[in-house]
Image: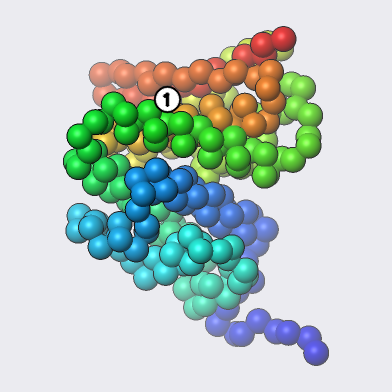
Amino acid sequence: MMQTTPWHERDSTIEEEHRFKRLLSLHALTQCWTQVLDNTDSNLIERMPKITLNQNLWLLEKARVDEITLELSALVGSQNIQEFLKELEETIWLIQISTLENAFSQTSDPALLKNLLKNASWSQGKKTAEQDWPNLPFTTLTDAYQAFTESHVNGKSGFLLGSAANQELGFYWKKSPIQNPSLNRSAQLEMLCELHSEWVHGFFYGLSRVIRCISQTVKAESDSWIEFTLLLTY
């Protein structure tokens, strides 16, 4: 018997499904941090009074336990899919910054905690690359960059390609946490950017062992951004 979509639900597009997958990948980074902190999402949520958690939080809790198997349109119901995805992304970013605020406000050794979280972020980036692009030989920096923008939560529109040559490729993160107005007052914003940069480093290592990724935060008078450079090491 043919299954029909209820009248109040709209079928999601391929791009929306892909964005949903990337959001779950973003939340997987949060989960690897909570593992480092020897905590659970449930306990963490109880200790985050600074943020307002919306109705989509149950989905992230389910994602912690297993894979989301329902179709995006079924999860959204009568809500606009684009609004649902926007709210979900905002929730994940707020949970990430609050996780770091909570952790660094309680630790007696911030330097050690920073190293542990950076290592976990790098490993999660490597894991994501190996899951998204298994057994594919990336022989050019351009191909590796395109794969990266397919997997990253901000997609192609979140980055600006700069210099490109056979052995070197530069790009800028246009939609980094620095540009997120709901996060830019946090004392842990710089740490959040560092951890995401480590994720990027690990991702490119997961794509190819001959690609090295380096990054730096560039600060101007009224703006700042994160710059990445890819290098072929053979």
* Residue ID at (30%, 57%): 44
- Circle 1 residue: 226
Measured as percent of width and height from the top left, residue 27 is found at: 46, 51
Q: Is residue 114 above or below residue 227?
A: below
Give the SS element for disc 1: strand
Q: Please name whichever residue, 219 or 115, is drawn nearer the observer in this view of the structure.
A: 115
Measured as percent of width and height from the top left, residue 113 is found at: 32, 33
> How many tags in the picture?
1
Q: What amino acid is at disc 1? A: Ile
Residue 103 can be seen in this image: yes
- Asked where in the image residue 116 lies, by quadrant, the reply is top left
* Residue ID at (80%, 90%): 1
Q: Is residue 234 above or below residue 98?
A: above
Measured as percent of width and height from the top left, residue 65 is found at: 51, 64
Q: Is residue 123 above or below residue 10?
A: above
Q: Please name whichever residue, 96 or 147, is drawn nearer the observer in this view of the structure.
A: 96
